[in-house]
Amino acid sequence: MNNIAIKNEVDAMFSEIMHCSYSYHSEPFELGYPDGLHAYVFRLQTEGSCEALVEGKMQRIESGDLMLFKPGDSYQLNIYGHNTDQDNGGAGVSSGDYFVICRGLWVDEWWNRKERPRKAKVVADERLLSTWRALILEKRRFLEEDREMADYLLRALCLGLDRAMITQSALQGKSFIATRMKNFIDERAGEPFLIRDIAGHVKLSVSRTIHLFKECFGMTIIQYTHNVRLSMAMERMKFSTMTLEQIAETCGFGSYSYFYRVFRQKHGISPAEYRVTKL
């Protein structure tokens, strides 16, 4: 077997990832493929809103909406001023999303495992977003992209999307509002907020917000928020040179003393002791 044949065989093993990124639009934007896509497009709305062609008609896409398109599907994306921007005296533009454009034999096999909706509401937890970010970083490598690494990250992402849709389906019978609470916490864990901010986001009373979250997720809002913030902090302690005080502040704890107390209660050691064991 000559070198060209070997290269072709190796190339066929891995999926082709044409583009993968996070996109934020603060100005109007339009994109369309009326004659059909030449690859798969997976897009997760994380901020703001937009409009997209789904099942033959333009639909509003909001935070938590996942769109899945296969080769041959028509694709149209419009980002206009859906959100009110009082400072500018009119309709502001705000739309943020993660997306990947890809194709390959494994993606074909994964897609054909079951019927897939073009639009689905998902629980976009930090684990799913971390996989997406890892794939983005791999595609942005200054050195040559590791195709095997990128391929496995894409597979992990696709399987993660399946899990997110299954999780959302399980929650549908309980409350979609509770999922919006969870997404609010996931998206804002690095900054301070109050339970009344969550209640205002879902338009419920504080007491109803507290009760509904506990009923659906089996833990309090405070417990879940601590878990998300501790996960962020542990990642930064392992992989960054930030001081513990900086980590406490940027992970939403406000002060190191509060971070210390919550961390020790959860893990039985201090943040400083944890950091030393991970060096």
Image (cartoon, grey):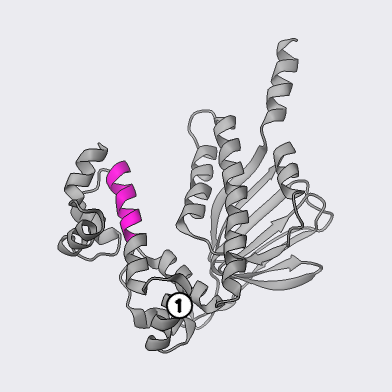
Magenta stretch encompasses residue 83: no
Quarter location, residue 192: bottom left
Q: Name the residue furthest bottom.
A: 205
Image side of residue 162 versus residue 83, left or right? right
Q: Name the residue furthest right.
A: 35
- Residue that appears at 74% across and 49% down: 113
Residue at which label 1 appears? 215
**Residue 166 vs residue 107, the one in the foreground:** 166
Q: Name the residue furthest top.
A: 2
- Residue 36 position within the rendered picture, expressed as x and y whole percent measured from the top left: 82, 53
Looking at the rendered structure, the kind of residue marked 1 is: Glu
- Residue 240 position within the rendered picture, expressed as x and y whole percent measured from the top left: 29, 44
Task: Please identify the quadrant where the N terminus is shown.
Answer: top right
- Residue that appears at 25% across and 43% down: 241
Within 10 Å of the Cα at label 1, are there few (<14), some (14-19), or many (20+) other Cα atoms?
A: some
**Residue 77 vs residue 268, the one in the foreground:** 268
- Residue 80 position within the rendered picture, expressed as x and y whole percent measured from the top left: 63, 72
Number of callouts = 1
Question: Magenta residues, as a range?
Answer: 229-239
- Residue 4 position within the rendered picture, expressed as x and y whole percent measured from the top left: 73, 15
- Residue that appears at 55% across and 30% down: 146
Quarter location, residue 149: top right
- Residue that appears at 33% across and 74% down: 193
Judged from the image, the secondary structure of the residue bearing numbered disc 1 is helix
The correct choice, above or below, for 248 with respect to 110 in the image is below
